[in-house]
């Protein structure tokens, strides 16, 4: 038996399944065994779906035998535990939903199943996707496979760690302010946040509805293209989903990059006092040289309102979360406190006992920002600033095809390092948040390594941002780089075998 399936990409596994070189049952069992033997080091899964996965795999094998099965048939992947999954616990990493079994599938889950994907399990995350380190999970922190003392990033930290350690060939994530790209960068994998509205949010537990977007997390751009083909599309159940045909994201991967105009925003480089790490910047510059060698042109640009993105986000996201999370009240579903005195006690104690500290902090900030005396000063003002940020990108994309920048100012920090300082934690998303406020697509790809503050060699991510619906272009730009380099093939020592 070939025992190296974890060294293969989704693209390769799909070809092997189609050629009958491996069965989905064999592959699924292989990854389930890997999760069972190694995940106690990482804590990247909340739920493992062994029986269901093997049944889906057996079904996939029948389809493969019958012929004409879609490309992802039989490929095992993991879903972030923010997606509702029929009959399977869907916790959003909160005590609030610890006992919640969803009665239906999120559209992303449904679409991917229809495309033949097998679900290995549900991955750990920050509670309700609020966090940058996966430390706010009710089920405990997730570890970074490159250094078990470091965080994997958040909020899709379980998905990133599982793919980084190759416990799953790929996973889904969601990105409200960086939660696909930042953990992808910290764990050395490839992640894509699509244009707002490209992928349905139906059945994806809402954090900040005007920012949330689901996307693929995998080993390569070509894997992300295959996964996005299955995920994307109009959904009448999501009123913000956009009625626009889904292109074949795998079709344009091989276009040459000659003449590609890459914008380098000055606000994302040469930052003197923003915690920008010199070794990270050096790795980014080497990647940019590679692009130049491939025929791209590097153009200096400005995104003058970049400094507004973190403050604007931390008004808009908490405001929307305070509204979205009001449904968790101990009555309709979710956690209920013991022996409530009266209705008010039931509401306050259920919410107080089941929401973690970060979630409570956001609900309070959001409720304050939306209250009648402060609405104009905070929420309205933030929405106006949001326009300025979108306009910066619109102007930039008149001059350039894509924008490149570091995904994060530094490599993964250590567990516990920022838990007492929420502002320092919020600033770790400084380069990813503007993209969500504007609603444009962006990727993170691994482009090398840099020493962390504790001397560990950790992955560095390059961020590639595109204009609305430019996912195919981003994937092409990332894929061409991955044809010339092998950073995306590197695996952490501890999980190589
Ligand atoms: N880290 C950011 C936050 O805590 C982004 C989270 C996300 O994208 N879900 O809000």
Image: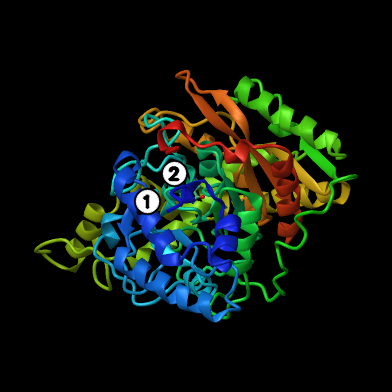
* Circle 2 or circle 1, nearest the eye: 2
Q: Position of residue 95 (x, y in %)?
A: 26, 55
Q: Which secondary structure, mark 1?
A: loop
Residue at left 37%, top 33%?
419
Q: In the image, is 195 to the left or to the right of 183?
A: right
Residue 18 seen by the camera = yes
Judging by the rendered image, the residue that carries numbered circle 1 is: 124
Q: Is residue 266 above or below residue 256?
A: above
Residue at mark 2 to residue at mark 1: CA–CA distance? 9 Å
Residue at left 33%, top 43%?
38
Q: Position of residue 245 (x, y in %)?
A: 72, 74
Q: Nearer the viewer, residue 271 or 442?
A: 442
Q: Position of residue 476 (x, y in %)?
A: 75, 52
Judging by the rendered image, the residue that carries numbered circle 2 is: 161
Q: Which secondary structure, mark 2?
A: helix
Mark 1 and mark 2 in contact (Cβ < 8 Å)? yes
- The quadrant where residue 11 appears: bottom right
First-in-chain label (2 vs 1): 1
- The quadrant where residue 203 appears: bottom left
């Amino acid at each position: 038996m070939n025992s190296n399936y974890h060294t293969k990409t989704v693209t390769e596994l799909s070809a092997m399944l189609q050629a009958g070189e491996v069965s989905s049952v064999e592959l699924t069992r292989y990854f389930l065994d890997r999760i069972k033997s190694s995940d106690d080091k990482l804590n990247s899964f909340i739920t493992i779906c062994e029986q269901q996965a093997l049944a889906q795999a057996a079904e996939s094998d029948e389809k493969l035998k019958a012929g004409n099965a879609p490309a992802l048939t039989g490929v095992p992947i993991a879903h972030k535990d923010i997606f509702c999954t029929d009959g399977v616990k869907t916790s959003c990493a909160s005590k609030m939903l610890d006992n919640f079994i969803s009665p239906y599938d999120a559209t992303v889950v449904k679409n991917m199943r229809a495309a033949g994907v097998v679900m290995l399990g549900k991955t750990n995350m920050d509670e309700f996707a609020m966090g940058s380190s996966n430390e706010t999970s009710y089920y405990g922190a997730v570890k970074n496979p490159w250094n078990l003392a470091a965080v994997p990033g958040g909020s899709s930290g379980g998905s990133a760690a599982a793919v980084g350690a190759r416990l799953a060939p790929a996973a889904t994530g969601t990105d409200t302010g960086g939660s696909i790209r930042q953990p992808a960068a910290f764990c050395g994998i490839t992640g894509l946040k699509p244009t707002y509205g490209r992928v349905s949010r139906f059945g994806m537990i809402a954090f900040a509805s005007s920012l949330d977007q689901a996307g693929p997390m995998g080993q390569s751009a070509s894997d992300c293209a295959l996964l996005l083909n299955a995920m994307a599309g109009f959904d009448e159940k999501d009123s913000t989903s956009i009625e626009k045909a889904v292109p074949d994201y795998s079709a344009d991967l091989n276009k040459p990059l000659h003449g590609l105009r890459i914008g380098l925003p000055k606000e994302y480089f040469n930052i003197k006092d923003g915690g920008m790490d010199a070794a990270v910047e050096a790795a980014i510059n080497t990647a940019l040289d590679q692009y130049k060698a491939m025929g791209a042109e590097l153009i200096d640009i400005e995104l003058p309102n970049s400094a507004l993105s973190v403050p604007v986000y931390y008004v808009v996201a908490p405001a929307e979360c305070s509204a979205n999370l009001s449904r968790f009240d101990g009555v309709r579903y979710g956690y209920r406190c013991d022996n409530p005195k009266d209705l008010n006690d039931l509401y306050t104690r259920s919410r107080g006992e089941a929401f973690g500290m970060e979630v409570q902090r956001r609900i309070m900030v959001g409720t304050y920002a939306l209250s009648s005396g402060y609405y104009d000063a905070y929420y309205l003002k933030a929405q106006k600033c949001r326009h300025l940020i979108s306009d910066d990108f619109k102007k930039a994309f008149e001059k350039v095809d894509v924008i490149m920048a570091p995904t994060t100012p530094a490599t993964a920090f250590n567990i516990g390092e920022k838990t007492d300082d929420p502002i320092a934690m919020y600033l770790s998303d400084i380069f990813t948040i503007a993209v969500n406020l504007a609603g444009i697509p962006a990727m993170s790809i691994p482009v090398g390594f840099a020493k962390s503050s504790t001397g560990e060699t950790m992955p560095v991510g390059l961020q590639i941002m595109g204009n609305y619906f430019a996912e195919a272009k981003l994937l092409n730009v990332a894929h061409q780089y991955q044809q010339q380099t092998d950073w995306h093939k590197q695996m952490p020592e501890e999980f190589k075998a």
